[in-house]
Each structure stands twice: as structure tokens, then as C-alpha cells.
Image (spheres, rainbow, N blue to C red):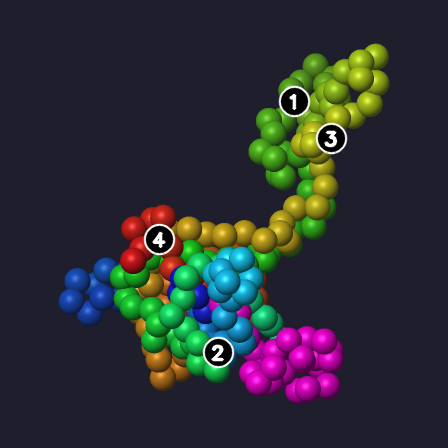
Amino acid sequence: MKGIVGTKLGMTQVFDPETGQVTPVTVIEAGPCPVVRVKTVESDGYEAVQVAFGSVPERKVSKPKLGQLGKAGPHRKLVEFRGPSELTEGETVTVEAFEPGERVKVSGIGIGKGFAGTIKRHNFSRGPVTHGSHNIRKPGSIGASATPARVRKGIRMAGRMGGKRATQVGLTVHEVDSERNLLLVKGAVPGPKNGIVEVREDRTHGGS
């Protein structure tokens, strides 16, 4: 499993000098990510690799996390990528691990949108606006009366929208800039500008 952690810098456009075709891309400043630990079936019951990202002063990291990071030193993010890997402890993952045209999936914390009603949050339809209706943007019935005489769990209602982990699959690496540690991914990825994202190879959508 190939993976790297980075920061979403924002979106821009790339023009093809020959055809003039415009491609919308998300610019991700990824790595370098030192490999902290490699898990195996023998020692941990499954295969995975842990990488660190975002070097910070030692005072900003707790002692337990500092011990977990080991020789990699103080970093603000520790991410585990599950699956078999050829990496070893002490190696560093860079954007050179990816190639243009490779299929990837990107995970991050989506943009929080605050408290939202059912129409915006769950795509409910509004009620009638004529004949004195008071049900224009209300959610409507949320359950039966006598049985079960309560609101069941999981009913879609108004509440906090966004701010949850999301994964965008089926993306493509458009360009790799190893000098500036940049990955240009075709399309949009979850999260706000300067948000931390995880880039993995996408084997389920034609990835290698």
C-alpha cells in the first residue's frame, strides 16, 4: 500500500500547451514523511506502515507520542496505512512514490458548515407555501405517537453539518513536482485550505 500525508494548498487550473485543454487540479504539499514503524502479521496480526508528517518543536508533542515517534523525531501527525508495504523503518516517503496518471483516493476532514436544517443537510423537499401552510421548511413527522412513543435513533433531523472525515475515490495524479514536494491531483479533494489530507493508491478503481 502506497500512501503519503500532506497539506491541501487549494485548487487551480493546468493548461495543456499543445491542445489548450484546461484541467482543474488540487495542489497538495505532501511529505517528506519518515517511516516510524512497519507492522507485520507475525508481530501485530496485520500489515501496515506508520508514517509521520509535519515537523514541530519537541515542546509541542506529548511524551507518550514522542516515544511512539521514536527516531523520526517530533511530528504533529502520525498516520497508519494498512496493507503490505516494501518500506522499512527509517525510510522517507516522498511524492516520487506516485506517478502521473496513477489512480489515488484522498481522505480528509470535510469543511464544517455549522448547524443546518433538514433541507440543506439531508436534501429534504420543502412543504407547500400556499393556503396558510406552516410547513414550508419544517422536517415533518419524526415518528409515530403511541408506538413506540419516542423518536427512534437515526432519524434524519437538523443538526451539525460537515466537519466529518470523508474520502474521495477515483482521483488521478496529474503531475508530480518532486523539487517542491507537490502532488497535483485532478479534481477536488475533501477539506479546507491548509487542511491535512491522506493520499493512498486506489486499487479498487484501476490503480496499480
Give the vertical position of 179 relative to 85 (above or below). below
User: Which quarter of the picture shows residue 18?
Assistant: bottom left
**Mark 2 against mark 3, which lies toward the viewer?**
2
> Disc 4 vs disc 1: Cβ atoms closer than 8 Å?
no
> Disc 2 vs disc 3: Cβ atoms closer than 8 Å?
no
Q: Which residue is mark 2?
A: 89
Q: Which residue is mark 3?
A: 153
- Quadrant including the N terminus: bottom left
**Mark 2 against mark 1, which lies toward the viewer?**
2
> Tag 2: residue type?
Glu
**Going by the image, does 154 lie left or right of 36?**
right
Label 4: state its secondary structure.
helix
- From the top left corner, tell me how far across and down residue 12 is, in percent: 40, 66
Density class for disc 2 (Cα within 10 Å; few <14, some 14-19, many ≥20) is some
Label 2: state its secondary structure.
loop
User: Which quarter of the picture shows residue 75?
Assistant: bottom right
Decide which of tag 4 and tag 1 comes sooner along the chain. Answer: 1
Decide which of tag 4 and tag 2 comes sooner along the chain. Answer: 2
Q: Which residues are magenta?
A: 49-75
Q: CA distance from mark 4 to mark 2?
A: 24 Å
Confirm whether the magenta stretch covers residue 53: yes
> Tag 3: residue type?
Lys
